[in-house]
Amino acid sequence: MKTQAAVLWEVGQDWRIEELDLDDPHEGEVLVRLTASGLCHSDEHVRVGDLPFAGYPVIGGHEGAGIVEKVGHNVTTVGEGDHVVLSWVPACGRCSWCANGHQNLCDEGADVAVGLQRDGTARHHVRGHDARLMCLIGTFSPYTTVRESSVIKIKNDIPLDKAALVGCGVTTGWGTAVYGAGVKPGDTVVVLGIGGIGANAIQGARIAGATKILAVDPAEFNREQAKRFGATHTFASAAQAREALPDLTRGQMANSALVTVGVVTGEILVDALSVVGKAGTVALTSLGSVVPSQTAVPLFEITAFQKRIQGALFGNANPRFDVPKLLELYKQGDLLLDELVTRTYTLDQINQGYEDMRAHRNVRGLIRYT
Amino acid sequence: MRTRAAILRTPGDWEITELTLDEPGPGEVRIRFGAAGMCHSDEHVRTGDSVVRLPMVGGHEGAGVVEAVGDTVTRVQVGDHVVCSFIPVCGTCRYCATGRQNLCNFGAQMLTGQLKGGGFRFHDDAGEDLGGMCMLGTFAQRAVVAQESCVKIDKDIPFDVAALVGCGVPTGWGTAVYAAGVRPGDTVVIFGAGGVGTNAVQGARYAGARHVIVVDPVEFKRDTALKFGATHVFADADAAQETVVDLTRGQLADHAICTIGRLESSVVTQAAAIVGKGGQVTITSVGRSGDNQIQLAANGAVVGWQRRIQGHIFGMCNPLYDIPRLLRLYREGQLMLDELITHRYRLDEINQGYQDLNDGKLIRGVIIHE
């Protein structure tokens, strides 16, 4: 079929809207008509080259939800008409990681920056070139053909535009607090960076029972947003938060720091280590440059105060468990999703959407296809 | 297709008969079994301790060759060697998605043997339908099972040892490693050193237990336990209790594990008494359906000493992870499996085999299919 997609032809260019030739699903694949796609920072990382892809062109977008239009042979977990969230990391359900409750580390995730189907071929073609898919899903298009392992069935009574955000940003932020840091009732938590991920890290910390949630962001708009999601204190810098913490915690400092800034650097990691106390955890979700940081990390302090740096990928969540669960929390009114979407765009307006993100005008931008 | 099988129509002896076997439907495979383990759970069915849908083809430990596959089968191919997992693993339900494959929702029909497509694949000459024990029925030369029950293995692993890794070995190993969570330096008391308990001994030893103390009235089993890593063996709990007090300077054991053939409340009481403050009693055995096998004074025995009673199935193992892993340990010479098999039987010797089991003559009996 013919449709449209936002395509990156090479690193550093803008997204370009192109006509897309989309093939029907082959064995084990699913064709999804998308309702909405989130504008997540990881696509920006691909655009600027922080996240190198195996080849180009690449169809961007890795947060989406929609309705199954067609299924290929041997597809058993979804059928035509099912409502689905596309998970940015596939969950095959069979590899050793899936078997042990680490679906976020599914072996099929090795292909997220390769972007081809399981047999190594493409279903997406642009101007005669095979196009790769961001995170194997490529949601910057009203239609996409993906592996069954990328598709998670959800209940039909959840608004699909809100559900789209749970395919990456919401779950990543929530899980950073709940699983990555393991926030406990009564904890003091510092969240560094309040965008689409940080706002949800605040929600995760709040629902996990944190009593003090300190949001740190230089942008006033983001600090204001943080309060809506449950931050109890806001600061423009980590240094200000560090100054306030001894009073707030009787000198114990924070139990955990969640790093959810747009682009992480060694300095930010050092900031995060400096706000947690003994046995504190720094959960590191943000991506930075693939070039190793040269920043000196206070090694003595990590050992002497038993501090822990915990990497968090997709919030260390299990998509097939956590995506439906978070949507139930939304239905119940505990998890805020509507409030995340600051502006909506058409596919044509995608570069404006990213400009707004870079200018801190959005918690989350959303492309609507319907 | 016709197959010989050992079946139960009512609690009593196993009946050897010929059955008709359907072709595999969608998602199903036909297996020609090389070997089947004679596990105590089938004996619980024979005696009526466990209530299942009858008539039933017995056997839930088996390994063999895939002879035919139905539509939409992707996990295995014709010619593959497989172990049947005692519980199927769908890979997508909330339990599979969180690393608890042993609780997979697909296992809901384990006591009827009905497959997902509906109905039963075994039929007798009177036209009656039979399910397979645990949706398997390995006491048949051939069976049609769900692909979710199959775990592919290397072709050079003998079927008789492979069969045991479908239930008894991971159940025992996992009892110590996962369900109890034995830590280096722990003192562990294991009640009952049969096919499951002997593997709990191996698991506890691997997990670094300092003392692995076995209580079993049968001398042959005590002698075997010593070969598998037990440090002390006793014929009765009183003698064990005295030694545990000495060995632990009065702190008592960290763990008691109940792997006796048939759970009685007296053994649970002995197990609770032999663990100290914060200790855990892990219950693997089942008793007579309808009886109350746990009769403890909550105040002192449980609350006051902060003891934990932990039930589990399959040793909390994840079949898709632990079955291949245990076979890898076996191949490396780290896990003793050959030594578990006391006697091999033909299918028509099955009642003799279970007589030997009840007489305490077996660690494991295995049926070698023709």
Image (cartoon, grey):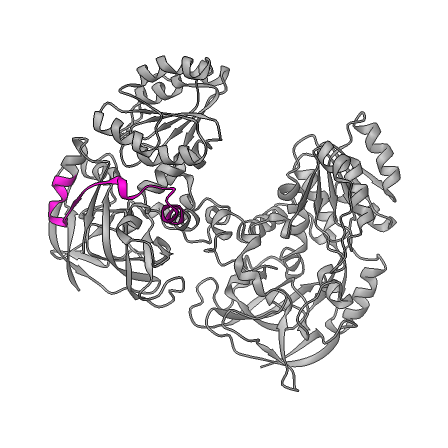
Seen in the picture, residue A11 relative to A305 is either above or below; the reply is below
Quadrant hosting residue A283: top left
Quadrant hosting residue A289: top left
**Residue appearing at x 32%, y 47% in the figure:** A167
Which residue sits furthest bottom? B126
Seen in the picture, residue B155 relative to A266 is either above or below; the reply is below
Magenta-drawn segment: A326-353
Q: Is residue B210 visible?
A: no
Residue A153 screen position, x and y as percent? 37, 57
Residue B255 screen position, x and y as percent? 72, 37
Which quarter of the image is occupied by the N terminus of chain A?
Answer: bottom left
Q: Is A334 inside the magenta-drawn segment?
A: yes
Q: Is residue B213 left or right of residue A325?
A: right
Please state which of residues B35 and B276 is positioned toward the viewer in this rendering. B276
Q: How many labels does the image show?
A: 0
Quadrant hosting residue A158: bottom left
Q: Is residue B25 visible?
A: yes
Dominant secondary-structure state across the stretch colored magenta? helix
Please state which of residues B246 and A109 is positioned toward the viewer in this rendering. B246
Seen in the picture, residue B87 relative to A323 is either above or below; the reply is below
Q: Is A1 inside the magenta-drawn segment?
A: no
**Residue appearing at x 77%, y 34% in the figure:** B300
Residue B138 screen position, x and y as percent? 65, 68
Residue A242 screen position, x and y as percent? 36, 15
Q: In this view, does A3 lie to the left or right of A284?
A: left
**Residue appearing at x 24%, y 56% in the figure:** A34
Which quarter of the image is occupied by the C terminus of chain A?
Answer: bottom left
Q: Is residue A126 left or right of residue B244?
A: left
